[in-house]
């Protein structure tokens, strides 16, 4: 196990990776009620046991997001392109705790978000939040009863969403953060140019500047600044601060807050290697 102080993690200099361009990375790292952690490297889904052993969970699937339900069932996608035509296809799979793997949505043409019938981001009531591009940028909310509502967004190419307990939904959109008030069906640019807090360290398209979102037990929001190779935290009063940096050669694409106060960071390298780095509250860390 490697160790580092919290101060060092927050102030480490990030070297520029300007000569390379990183492709669209995965953003989800999730933990079930048993303490098993899952993440994708876009080729396979990996499982980390509570004791730290890493094994393959699902082989040969291309998924950017993962979702765990209350029964510890893991959901993911397998997005592919036809070798001959380049036409996109996808399917949605489910991995049960006993290892059974089944298709929830069989393979079909197009992109998953175009259909608006399945979402990997959900709130405690089971409402799914789906970001759509076709027909204009929008947030689609699909309730457990099948009721669907659609809110137009003020920025093109929305990235990823995070529902919060106050009935809002935070959304990354390029360098900005949007926020939707689901009670009023209204969307605003909440944090314009949030990327200004983190100098550019990775050459990516602006639409990938900010990626994954997560919350801790105190209700603070964390944003993976992929372009800035850092993590931005937004406190309940709206205060913004940079709380962690990735080591040189890496950048965070997502993360989660562990039940013990640790921060789990999904990190991607310039050559698209993927790893998970767990940072404890005392500054010690472990890389998987």
Image: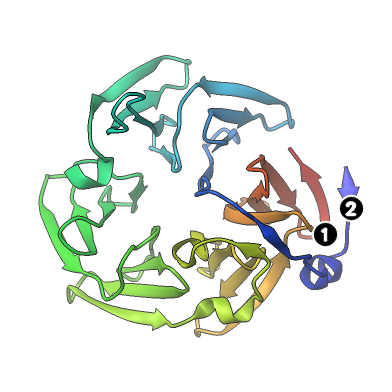
| Nearest to the observer: residue 204 or residue 173 | 204
Q: Are marks 2 and 1 in contact (CB under 8 Å)?
A: yes
Image location of residue 24, percent across then percent down: 50, 49
Viewer can see residue 46:
yes
Going from the N terminus, do you reach mark 2 or mark 1 first? 2
| Nearest to the observer: residue 29 or residue 158 | 158
**Residue at image point 17% right, 77% down:** 184
Q: Is residue 266 above or below residue 46?
A: below
Which residue lies most toward the front here?
A: 84
Viewer can see residue 235:
no
**Residue at image point 48% right, 81% down:** 193
Compared across the picture, whether 261 is left or right of 28 comes to right
Which numbered dot is residue 206?
Answer: none
Q: Quadrant of the C terminus?
A: top right
| Nearest to the observer: residue 231 or residue 132 | 132
Compared across the picture, whether 156 is left or right of 36 comes to left
Compared across the picture, whether 129 is left or right of 39 comes to left
Q: Quadrant of the N terminus?
A: top right
Badge count: 2
**Residue at image point 33% right, 53% down:** 123
Tell me how far mark 2 sits from mark 1, CA to CA.
7 Å
Image location of residue 177, percent across then percent down: 42, 74
Residue 74: which quarter of the image? top left
Which element type, helix, strand or loop, lies under badge 1? loop
Which numbered dot is residue 3?
Answer: 2
Which numbered dot is residue 283?
Answer: 1
Which element type, helix, strand or loop, lies under badge 2? strand
Residue 182: which quarter of the image? bottom left
Residue 72: which quarter of the image? top left
Image location of residue 180, percent across then percent down: 28, 72
Image location of residue 79, percent across then percent down: 37, 33
Q: Is residue 75 above or below residue 224?
A: above
């Amino acid at each position: 196990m490697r160790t580092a102080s919290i101060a060092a993690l927050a102030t480490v200099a990030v070297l520029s990776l300007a000569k390379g361009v990183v492709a669209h990375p995965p953003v989800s790292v999730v933990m079930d009620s048993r303490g098993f952690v899952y993440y994708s490297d876009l080729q396979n889904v990996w499982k980390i046991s509570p004791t730290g052993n890493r094994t393959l969970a699902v082989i040969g699937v291309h998924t950017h997001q993962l979702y765990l339900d209350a029964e510890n069932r893991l959901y993911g996608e397998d997005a592919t392109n036809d070798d001959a035509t380049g036409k996109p296809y996808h399917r949605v799979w489910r991995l049960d705790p006993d290892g059974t793997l089944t298709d929830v949505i069989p393979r079909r043409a197009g992109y998953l978000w175009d259909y608006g019938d399945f979402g990997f981001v959900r709130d405690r009531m089971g409402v799914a939040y789906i970001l759509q591009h076709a027909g204009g940028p929008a947030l689609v909310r699909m309730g457990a009863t099948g009721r669907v509502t659609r809110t137009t967004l003020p920025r093109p190419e929305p990235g990823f969403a995070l529902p919060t307990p106050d009935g809002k939904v935070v959304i990354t959109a390029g360098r900005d953060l949007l926020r939707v008030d689901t009670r009023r069906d209204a969307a605003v640019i909440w944090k314009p140019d949030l990327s200004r807090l983190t100098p550019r360290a990775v050459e990516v398209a602006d639409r990938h500047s900010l990626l994954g979102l997560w919350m801790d037990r105190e209700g603070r929001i964390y944003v993976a600044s992929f372009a800035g190779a850092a993590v931005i935290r937004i406190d309940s009063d709206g205060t913004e601060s940079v709380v962690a940096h990735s080591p040189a050669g890496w950048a965070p694409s997502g993360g989660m807050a562990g039940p013990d106060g640790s921060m789990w960071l999904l990190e991607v390298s310039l050559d698209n290697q993927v790893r998970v780095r767990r940072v404890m509250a005392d500054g010690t860390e472990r890389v998987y």
